[in-house]
Image: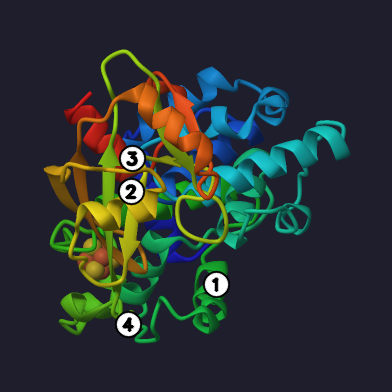
Amino acid sequence: MSDITNLLLKWHKEIDRDLPWKNTVNPYFIWVSEIILQQTRVEQGTPYYHRFIHKFPTIKLLAEASQEDVYKVWEGLGYYSRARNMHATAKYIHYELNGNFPKTYAELIQLKGIGPYTAAAISSFAFNEDKAVLDGNVFRVLSRLYGEEAFINVPKNRKLFQALVDQLLPKGKSAGFNQAIMDFGSIQCKPKKPSCSSCKLNGHCSAFIEGRVEQLPKKKKAKAKKNRYFYFLDLRPNGKVFPVIKREGDDIWHGLYSFPYLDAYTKLELSSDLWSDALAFPIDDAPKLRWSTKHILSHQILHCFFYEVEIDSVMLQKNHLSASRISYKWIKNHHDVPWPVVISKYLNIFS
Ligand code: SF4
C-alpha cells in the first residue's frame, strides 16, 4: 500500500462522518444516494434521500411507480433526467432481471443512467469490487497531489486521472478507500481554501510543495450560457381548477408541469394579444407581474417572470374547448403534479 493511501485511510479513521447511506451494502440504497448526491450537497441531498427511500423502499416499488410519482419525490432537486433514467433502470432490473441487481462494474455500466462513477461506487460499496471512484472531489485531490495540469472537465483526460487513482487503490479495500478519498476531497482538500497546513498529505502534495494549490485543478472554460426568457401566467382561481401544461419533447423540464407560458431567447414586449395568441384563449386585461427570478441551468440562464390575471375559470374552460392547439390539463391543487424547481419556488411563496 502506498504512503499516500496509508495516510488517507488513517485520516479517514480519525474523522467520524456518519451518513445514512454509509452503513449499508444494499446496492439499491447506494445507487439512490449516489444519483442524488451527484447534483447536490450532502446537507441538501440527505432529506431527499430519506424521502425517496421512504416512498420507494425497494427497487420493485420504484419500478411499479408512475413517472409522476417519481418526479414528485424528486421535485426541487432538478436534473430530472436522472430520476427518469433511474426509473427506467429500476423497471429493467425488476422486470427483465427478475429484481437481481447487477453486481459487477462491467454489468452496471451497461445500465441507463449509470456512468463510470456510479458503477464504481455501487460495485465497490455494495460488492467490494476493486474499482476506484472518480468524482469531482477525487479529480481535485489527484490534480493537486500530483500537480496534474490536465483539464479535469475534458472527457478524454478521464483515463489519465483514473490511472492515478487506480495506483492508489488498495486491493480488497476499495469501499473504505473510495469513501476516504471522496470525504478527503469534501472536508480537507476543499475547492476553496483547502486546509493544507493541517493536511496529513502535505508532505506528498506537489501543489502544496510548489505553491500551486490555488491554481489547481485546471478546468476548461465552459461555453457561454444562453439567456432564455419565460413568462408564466398563474391562473389559479380560489378553489377551482386551473390549467397547466405538461412539458414534452427534448427541451428542459420534460414530463414536468408548467403554468401556461410564453418563452423566447430574447426579452418579449408583452401585450394582451400576445398572451391570448400564445395561450390560445382570450386575455382582455394585461396580466400583472407578481414575481421574477433568475434560474441558472447547466447551459441556459432562465429569466423567469410570473404574471397573474383575473379570468373566470368557467369561461376559461369553455374557451379552451374550442382551442385545441394547446393541450391543457386541469388540476385543482398544485400538489397534484410535479413542477420544475423554479415554479416550485414560486408556489412556495405564493401558494
Ligand atoms: S496539502 Fe492542501 S492541496 Fe495538498 S492534498 Fe492536502 S489539502 Fe489538498
**Type of amino acid under label 3:** Val
Question: Disc 3 designates what residue?
Answer: 42
Q: Earlier in the sequence, mark 3 or mark 2?
A: 2
Real-space Cα distance between discs 2 and 1? 22 Å
- Mark 3–mark 4 Cα distance, whole angstroms, equals 28 Å
Q: CA distance from mark 2 to mark 4?
A: 21 Å
**The disc labelled 1 sits on which kind of residue?**
Gln
- Disc 3/disc 1 C-alpha distance (Å): 24 Å
Secondary element at image label 4: loop
| Label of residue 147 in the image | 4
Residue beneath the point at 42% across and 45% down: 37
Mark in the foreground, 3 or 4: 3
Please indicate, yes or no, whether residue 62 appears anywhere in the rendered image.
yes
* Mark 1: secondary structure: helix
Residue at 25 percent across and 72 percent down: it is 266
Alpha-carbon distance for marks 3 and 2? 20 Å
Secondary structure beneath dot 3 equals helix
What residue is pinned by disc 2?
A: 11
Report x, y in % for residue 146. 37, 79
Lower sequence index among marks 2 and 4: 2
Is disc 4 in contact with disc 1, using a CB cutoff of under 8 Å? no
Which is more foreground, mark 2 or mark 1? Answer: 1
- Contact, CB < 8 Å: mark 3 with mark 1? no
Residue 301 pos. (x, y %) = 27, 65
Q: Is residue 185 above or below residue 32?
A: below
Counting from the top left corner in percent of width and height, residue 11 is at 33, 48
Q: Which residue is mark 1?
A: 162
Assign ligand 1 to one image quadrant.
bottom left
The amino acid on which the numbered mark 2 sits, given as a three-letter code, is Trp
Q: Does 300 sit above or below residue 98?
A: below
> Comparing marks 3 and 1, which lies closer to the viewer?
3
